[in-house]
Amino acid sequence: MKLLELGDGGGSEMEASEAPSSPSELEEESMAESPRLIGFIIANIVGIRHYSGTINKREMVGLLREPLNPFDTNAIMVFNTRSVQVGHIERSVAAALSPLIDSHIAIVEAIVPKPLRNSSQYRLPCQLHIFARPSAVAIVRSAIDAADLELIEEDNAAFGVSEAAFVLEKKIWSSSSDDSFLDHVFELVGKDFGLGLKPVEPPKEVISSELFPHQKEGLGWMIHRENETGLPPFWEERGGNFFNVLTYHETREKPEAIKGGILADDMGLGKTLILLSLIAMDKKNYISREESCSGKRRRTGKKVLNRGEKRRVTLVVCRPSVLTSWISQLEEHTMAGSLKVYLYHGERTRDVTELMNYDLVLTTYATLSGEFDSSDSPMKKIEWFRVILDEAHEVKNFAGRQTKAVIALKAERRWAVTGTPIQNSSFDLFSLMAFLRFQPFSVRSYWQRLIQRPLSQGSESGLARLQVLIGAISLRRSKDLIGLPLKTVETCFVNLTAEEREQYDILEEKSRDTVRNLMEENTLEHNFSTVLLILLRLRQICNDIALCPSDTLSICPANALQDVSGNPDLLRKLLSLVQDGDDFECPICISPPKKTAITCCAHIFCEACISRITKQSNARCPICRHPLSRSDVYLSPQPSAENNIQSSSKPSSKIQALLQLLQKDKEHHPSAKSVIFSQFRQFLLLLEEPLEAAGFRVLKLDGSMSLKKRIQVIKELGGEGKCKEMPTVLLASLKASGAGVNLAAATRVYLTEPWWNPAAEEQAIDRVHRIGQKEEVRVVRFVVRGSIEERIMEMQERKRKLAQGAFRRKDQDEQKQMMTDYVKTMMKL
């Protein structure tokens, strides 16, 4: 089945796993950024006597395309807020709209107005609101006219009967005499969400460390959320029924309470210890039951569950680098042997019974993703007591395979844990709603209508709803609560030498001409990998000319699709893009690729993402629509650990600036330890020799290291190693240490270049500025004047405002920039 609108994010009967993962999703999501309402059609929902779903007046309903329906290939199914089928859109209307939907020309949303008193038991009137990009409006109008349907547009007097929520809100917001519609809604549902944060002590027989007050309060809040029995936000009881004040759905069945939520504390506030304490509470109850068992059981010392009783097993899903943190936190904060822990990673058991004997199972997103299609995966069979997504922003892309894998997990209690729940846009939150199964926000079409579209149109309603939603199920505290030592952040502007400036200007001008030609020939989208390579090289030359190959200026032609199967030079350049850049994201799952693949049309994806597409009939590249088969996809080799960059005799301007600051700091603070972050592995390799020559002890932390080696390096940074008398510098890559790693032994942070994602920068900084830090932390960002780095800094500020807007009242969400506008900004066009 193909999902209408933007797909279905979950529900009681229609699970999120039904959503397709195909090129069309990229097109739909791109389209969803700037559609506008062109009008609505009055239609009937038919066949309602055959289905159990019910609808109230002014209730939003979901639509689902059924191209494989045996009775009508144009079928459009209708379901209510709880994902229960109500009927179908009548045939004549479906025949007109289905081609527009299937070709992604239009988006359709439905709402049932106040039913007539004597409405038929066979049909129910509804309003179908049609959205399209401005360039497609004429096509939509023509198709609707050809079907003899009436499109009621805004200039039509009948438009006033539209029951769309955002239309009604627009009317009320524009009225100076009426109270805000949203104020009325929140008056009903926004009261007394929180009961206060009551501190709870973790069991001493499990947790050996003393928690800070904010951690005890966080533990109390999580226990309260897990024992929640009341109605979810936006629901209220009316006359024995349950009514959703946003969607107007009414049901006799009480909505299930949300046992869990989002722990969104600032990075570095000790969220892992709070989570361990929550898991320890289960163990405390288990031990208590054991102590009440027979004397025989106590004498044997065996922990035997009472008959019919299940062990409360918690599954934690995280990145491979964060496994390091969990292991070290377990060693540091729990009594030896008090928790039975299994690492479901690498060589692992497939025995469900064995896994159920543990208190805590640790695994990675990649492991879950790899087993997603496996019918015998124990991860899918077990009904977990609790599932915790650590660094939950890893599942920000709903179309991603790992997101679908975590949503499909069976669990009684669900937690999303992240200090950066929004990294790129508010749509990042939708995947968390789908994981938490928070209806109706776990259904993608409702999220679009109630949150995403109002936000993208600059409406106060979307932001206000988002804030109430977040406030209802999340806890967020800042570092101000615990009085961490001061953190200062400064920017060090670097001026290039005359030689470096000449090289940079030549590359930028050549690059600008290439991009301009792509835009004029309307081939920018088809050659976006070329653009990525250009941007990468411009950023690298700001660090050191040595990072740019001698043939950098021979950028591939822009007048046609480039077939890498017959162009080994282009393939080599694209491989360098993959290997040199540490922050590249797959355009399908919007995550760093685990295994990188390059298509014959020169576009780069996760191997898993593009493989699913090549399995489809008539498969095409999601970027340029070039036909694809499995033989058209090339796997990128793993990067070599050897330093194949030849450094110049004189360090670059940026390296010299870094060395000057380190030397100055060494004079005033001889024992200070520093962390140097870079996205470019080769640049970190270039830094080793000049740092050692300057008398620094150099440690390295990168993605090529084993878990054991990473733990050892972090311990050495903390002083558990040799050469303590030398000032220590840790060279750290973004992937290996950007999240979940404790580097509080250091007090200096150097960011050698600005990163596309400001949240990733903040994560890296907070590996040092976190609980356990006892000294002032100094952060220095390096930015080359008059370069692409200054423009990246400008883009970062826009993203920061967006992320703050979800938790604060002052800022509003901003629309996503289209790809062309983004490239124009970066290239100063």
Image: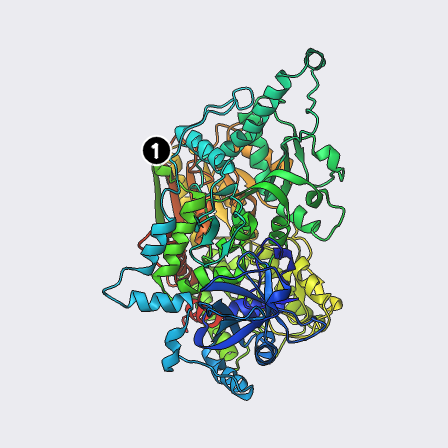
* Amino acid on which the number 1 mark rests in the picture: Gly
Q: Is residue 266 above or below residue 803?
A: above
Position of residue 116 measured from the top left corner of the image (x, y, whole percent): 46, 70
Quarter of the image that includes the N terminus: bottom right
Closer to us: 264 or 687:
264
Q: Which residue is mark 1?
A: 483
Position of residue 499 measured from the top left corner of the image (x, y, whole percent): 44, 63
Quarter of the image that includes the C terminus: bottom left
Colouring method of the image? rainbow
Which residue corresponds to the image point at 70% horizontal and 26% vertical from the top-left?
307
- The reply, left or right, for residue 717 in relation to residue 619 is left
Q: Is residue 254 above or below residue 9?
A: above
Position of residue 377 measured from the top left corner of the image (x, y, whole percent): 73, 45
Position of residue 176 measured from the top left corner of the image (x, y, whole percent): 23, 65
Q: Looking at the rendering, which quadrant does residue 28 occupy?
A: bottom right
Numbered disc 1: secondary structure = loop
